[in-house]
Amino acid sequence: MVKNNNHFSDKAKKDLELVNAAISGDQIAYAKLMERHRDSIYYMMLKMVKNEQDAEDLTIEAFGKAFSRLKQYTPVYAFSTWLYKIATNNCIDFIRKKRIEVTSMEGKVNKDGEPLFVIDPKCTEKSPEEEIIHLQKVKHMRDLVEQLKPRYKVLVQKRYFEELSYEEIATELNLPLGTVKAQLFRARDFLAKMIENNRDRI
């Protein structure tokens, strides 16, 4: 059991009571800790990743990691400080994993910060020569996507060619939302490596 610390605020002391109760096996205490800090963690995650679904996932992950390590918590700092550190570190790891340096043939990303692998040729004014080069790049990009495993290929096509949302893809393919996100992440990683190996043609 974590001993109380007199230097804590009333809110921090209440958190500490709940931590001790949770460690003792009180499941309601876990729920109360999450209820007390969920919103602040969520908005901190949202500020960092700029995406509501990712922020929600990261919030759940932060509490999961904190609760699994609850016996390691010592009241040198308030529980909230310890929790926010876990959430922040987890979010930084997520951002590092998600960031792909070779994002696309023109270095652009979509509204969710993901690599925009296919760009509408009509979106900008181009000279005839530039148009031909651009279309060649688009064709080569599609050729690379065709080399992906079927389950990855269909996800990339629906996300980047058809511009469907995660939720729309999950519904259309009858897959869990988490599966769609995880497999798209892997597909982008594979595709980024293929782009790197074909940089002279992209």
Image: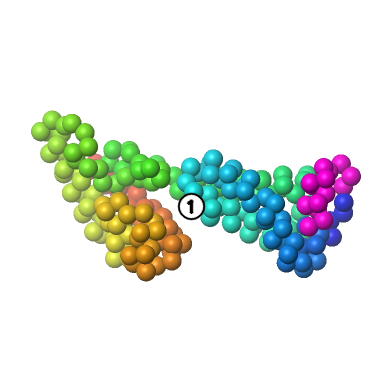
Q: Main secondary structure of the magenta part?
A: helix
Residue in front for this viewpoint, 30 or 64:
30
Q: Residue at x 54, y 53 (%)?
A: 56
Picture layout, residue 89 above or below residue 166: above
- Outermost residue on the right side: it is 6
Tag 1 secondary structure: helix
Q: Is residue 156 magenta?
A: no
| Region rendered in magenta | 5-18
| Residue 166 quadrant | bottom left
Q: Is residue 7 magenta?
A: yes
The x, y position of residue 147, in whole percent, is: 25, 59
Q: Is residue 33 left or right of residue 113?
A: right
Q: Is residue 120 left or right of residue 52?
A: left
Residue in front for this viewpoint, 115 or 159:
159
Quadrant for the N terminus, please. bottom right
Q: Is residue 38 left or right of residue 151?
A: right
Q: Residue at x 78, y 57 (%)?
A: 19
Picture layout, residue 107 above or below residue 97: above
Quadrant for the C terminus, please. top left
The x, y position of residue 46, in whole percent, is: 53, 44
Q: Which residue is mark 1?
A: 53
Q: Residue at x 38, y 42 (%)?
A: 111
Q: Is residue 119 left or right of residue 38?
A: left
Q: Residue at x 72, y 58 (%)?
A: 32
| Amino acid carrying mark 1 in the image | Gln
